[in-house]
């Protein structure tokens, strides 16, 4: 398990314990966190799980894939250096304490 904190665009923080192997998108949608839609169900086909990974954890993640890179071009909110698709990030115990910021719109 890892405690992940999602921060809405307005600044509301919601912390949830997520099992290893779940994606950040699954964690948000299964816990009713507004700000991540996940319309494609996690197949890297829509960019509605766009999020910003806290700098302290961004360098610990698997590198961004070509598919994810391409989908981020269609993200509705601003693309930043720490932009990722939540469906492509699988939770590990090492992510305990991670903060995920959500964009203004998906």
Image (cartoon, grey):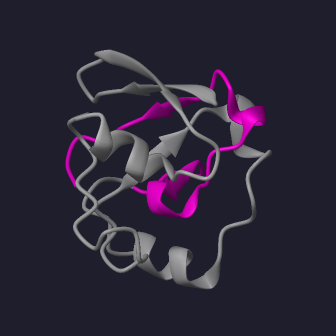
Estimate the x, y position of residue 105 in percent, counting from the top left. Answer: 20, 48
Estimate the x, y position of residue 75 in percent, counting from the top left. Answer: 32, 65
In this picture, is 99 found above or below 86? above
Estimate the x, y position of residue 20 in percent, counting from the top left. Answer: 64, 44
Is 95 inside the magenta-drawn segment? yes
Estimate the x, y position of residue 66 in percent, counting from the top left. Answer: 61, 83
Q: Residue at x 66, y 68 (%)?
A: 64
Quadrant of the drawing holding the N terminus:
top right
Is 33 inside the magenta-drawn segment? no
Q: How many marks?
A: 0
Q: Which image quarter: residue 43?
A: bottom left
Q: Judge from the rendering whether residue 51 lies leftward or rightward of residue 59; answer left or right.
A: left
Q: Residue at x 28, y 73 (%)?
A: 40
Quadrant of the drawing holding the C terminus:
bottom left
Q: What range of the chain is rendered magenta? A: 79-106
In this picture, is 17 found above or below 82? above
Q: Residue at x 35, y 80 (%)?
A: 45
In this picture, is 4 found above or below 103? above
Q: Judge from the rendering whether residue 25 lies leftward or rightward of residue 75; answer left or right.
A: right
Q: Residue at x 65, y 77 (%)?
A: 65
Q: Judge from the rendering whether residue 47 lies leftward or rightward of residue 79; answer left or right.
A: left
Between 100 and 78, the one nearer to me in the picture: 100
């Amino acid at each position: 398990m890892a405690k992940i904190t999602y921060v809405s665009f307005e600044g509301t923080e919601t912390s949830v314990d997520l099992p290893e192997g779940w994606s950040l998108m699954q964690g948000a949608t299964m816990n009713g966190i507004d700000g991540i839609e996940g319309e494609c169900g996690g197949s890297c086909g829509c960019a509605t799980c766009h999020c910003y990974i806290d700098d302290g954890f961004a360098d610990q993640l698997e590198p961004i894939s070509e598919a994810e890179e391409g989908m981020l071009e269609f993200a509705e909110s601003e693309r930043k250096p720490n932009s990722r698709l939540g469906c492509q990030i699988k939770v590990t115990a090492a992510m305990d304490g991670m903060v995920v910021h959500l964009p203004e719109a998906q």
